[in-house]
Amino acid sequence: MIGACPRIKWWLVFGWTVACLAKAVRADTWQGSAEVRFEATSTLHDFAGTVRTQPFAGLVTFDDSVAILSATASVAVADMDTRHAKRDMNMRRMFAADRFPLVTGVLDQARLEPPFPRQVPLRLTICDHVQTIPATIVDARLQDGRLRFDLALELSLRECRLSPPVILGFIKVGDLVQVRIQVDMEKPAGADPP
């Protein structure tokens, strides 16, 4: 009977540890949307455009009070809008929108905790080319069941294997595109507060 006491103590400690860990980490599927703003240069003048993501779901895990996000979101190339019909048409050609209608981004286990800015890897699929690029979480706010954060990144058209058209033999788009993504996620009804 004396030899059983250490085993009982070990099982009690193990059970208490598991119970503490189970309480500290919780995950729910949150619904998300985002607005993407992109800015580029060209030989004549700079321009900007916007596109909204398709609705998406993301797994938000809370480790104590830190939100950890894993999500996949897509934008339709046909919805990208620079407020100039001919430029939009050329952009859709560059993306081969007829064959590759979506641009998809994946965040995997991104920790949304200070200090900001915080760099995270973003896996992008553009056309049939997949690459991981550094993105920066500029800030994140968790309030009233909503998680909002801004993500900033710089894309090289060349590294994405995109060739923008040259207009009139000399007007062309610069290689680097600045992208800012404003993400808004909402927790499901009935989920425990973070």
Image: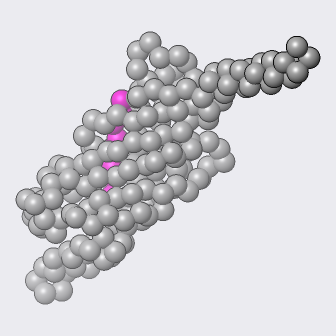
Query: Magenta span has 190?
Result: no
Q: Residue at x 43, y 49 (%)?
A: 107
Residue lying at the far bottom of the rendered structure: 169
Percent position (x, y) of residue 97? 12, 59
Q: Nearer the viewer, residue 164 or 130?
A: 130
Q: Is residue 48 visible?
A: no
Percent position (x, y) of residue 131? 36, 65
Q: Residue at x 13, y 79 (%)?
A: 167
Q: Nearer the viewer, residue 43 or 28?
A: 28
Q: Is residue 105 visible?
A: yes
Asked whether, in this view, residue 82 is left or right of residue 31, the answer is left
Q: Residue at x 57, y 44 (%)?
A: 111
Note whether 115 is above or below 191 in the view shown: below
Q: Which residues are magenta?
A: 31-38
The C terminus, quarter of image: top right
Percent position (x, y) of residue 193? 55, 18
